[in-house]
Image (spheres, rainbow, N blue to C red):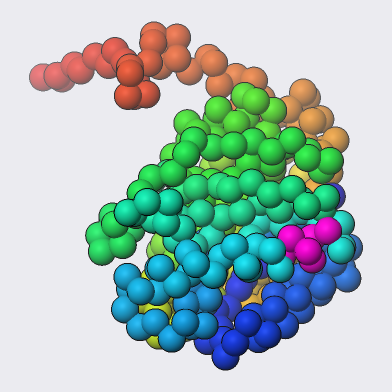
Amino acid sequence: MKIAAACYPLSRLADWDAYETKITRWIEEAAGRSADLLVFPEYGAMELASLSGATTLADQMQAVSAALPRAWDIQSRLAMRHGLHILAASGPVFAGARALNRAMFLGPEGGRAPVDKRVMTPWERMPMDMEPGRAPTLFDTALGRVGVQICYDCEFPLPTRAMVEAGMDVLLVPSATETLAGYHRVRIGAQARALEGQVVTVQSPTQGIADWCEVVDVNRGAAGVFCPPDLGLPDDGVLALGQEGVPGWTYAEVDLAALAHVRASGNVRTRRDWEEQAFRQEGTSAKGSASPISITRLR
């Protein structure tokens, strides 16, 4: 398959026509390059707040929640027109008093399924007061089995491992980070998940300045597609890497047969050998941490 990861700049939109023109141009550009799977970033949907004229954080979150169904409809039509799988940019969605950070996975036949962030960053806890979402879902597609971990979620290995054990091939990591340190934390998490699960991971960040929206006022990062560094794959585990701060698509060809070969005959077999970790042999606590752990004082 061919994957397209967006380094996506946020626009102050004049109206819905401006949004549809922009998203159509992005999707048709990737379709024109024969991409099969398109990935947009975390909080890329915050640009929809500009359609309402809202200025406060609370009002912008409500505005995006109200606008997202229409945005998903537009992208779903484009996915069907071009035969694509698309992970639409995430944004706050109110299912009650509090919002979820929700992306939408769109299929080429009109199917769609929500994906929610599980672990909130300090900013999402306060002032956004976001609610943790549902457990991860693994999508069985014509391209392979695809999972999603939104930004900070990918820095925690166990949910990804559960998807690996269910046969995941590709992990999508939409992100939004305001510093290079934040970008690299997510990228390191994505590359770690690729290494330990012997899967391909795809990072798609927001880009640029959107000083009219405090959720995404500053955005740093580069799009990238990563793999386990092993036989027949890049020595540095980087299938493709865009330029930091430059908007556009980053493309990578992904060969699932090459991944299968590495899992079966690679120099290391991290996917298979996970069970040999001592903490799994000794038991895992209810909170998922290693147990028991002995502590020895050296004198």
Q: Main secondary structure of the magenta part?
A: helix
Q: Is residue 139 visible?
A: yes
Q: Is residue 79 magenta?
A: yes
Figure check: 128 above or below 63: above
Q: Quadrant of residue 272?
A: top right
Direction from residue 258 to residue 225 in the image, left or right = left
Q: What's the residue at 59%, 37% (across, down)?
A: 137
Q: Quadrant of the C terminus?
A: top left
Q: How far from the left and from the top, in percent, is residue 278?
A: 43, 14
Give me the residue at 79% from left, 60% from top: 79
Residue furthest to the top in view is 282
Residue visible at 19% across and 16% down in the picture: 296
Answer above or below: position of 201 versus 197. below
- Residue 25 is drawn in which quadrant? bottom right
- Quick check: 84 left or right of 18? right
Please state the total of marks drawn on the protein image: 0
Residue appearing at x 83%, y 58% in the figure: 80
Residue 192 vs 16, above or below: the answer is: above
Query: Magenta stretch?
Result: 75-80
In the shown orientation, is residue 167 left or right of residue 133?
right
Q: Is residue 233 above or below residue 36?
A: above
Which is nearer the eye, 45 or 30? Answer: 45
In percent of width and height, residue 178 lies at 41, 71
Q: Is residue 187 visible?
A: no
The image quadrant of residue 82 is bottom right
Residue 149 location in percent, x, y?
54, 46
Magenta region includes residue 246:
no
Furthest-left residue in view?
299
From the top left corner, tell me how far across and down residue 92 is, in percent. Answer: 44, 61
